[in-house]
Image (cartoon, rainbow, N blue to C red):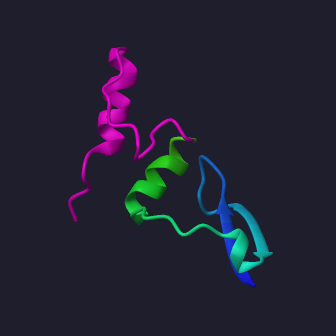
Amino acid sequence: MLSVFIPTAPNPTTGWYAVVPQRSVKDLDLSVEDAFRTIISAGIVSPDERETPSNRSFSSLLAQLRAPQLS
């Protein structure tokens, strides 16, 4: 059994906690940064979608979410 936290958008500090069989969990090759971008954008930004949308305001939002964060 594995403990799994399923965050909700737009606040990833809230969500669901579940205990599930290990065979029901799929391990993803996804960085924490990409995961947070997807969660905070409510699924609008997906790591698999790297195309530029045609809408300028939407495009600028995506560009900001995809921009690497400098620490």
Image coords of residue 32 (percent x, y): 42, 65
As drawn, 66 above or below 71: above
Picture residue at 36% right of the left edge, 42% below the top:
65
As drawn, 7 above or below 60: below
- On screen, residue 50 versus residue 13, left or right, reads left
Image coords of residue 60 (percent x, y): 31, 27
Instruction: Residue at the far bottom: name it.
Output: 1
Q: Which quadrant of the view contains residue 27? A: bottom right
Q: Which residues are magenta?
A: 43-71
Name the magenta segment's main secondary structure.
Answer: loop
Picture residue at 44% right of the left edge, 49% below the top:
37
Q: Which quadrant of the view contains residue 48? A: top left
Picture residue at 37% right of the left edge, 31% below the top:
61
In the image shown, does 3 or 22 lie closer to the viewer? 22
Q: Quadrant of the C terminus?
A: bottom left
Instruction: Residue at the far front: name it.
Output: 23
As drawn, 14 above or below 63: below
Q: Quadrant of the N terminus?
A: bottom right
Image coords of residue 25 (percent x, y): 66, 70
Image coords of residue 30 (percent x, y): 42, 62
Picture residue at 75% right of the left edge, 70% below the top:
17
- On screen, residue 10 versus residue 71, left or right, reads right
Q: Which quadrant of the view contains residue 55? A: top left
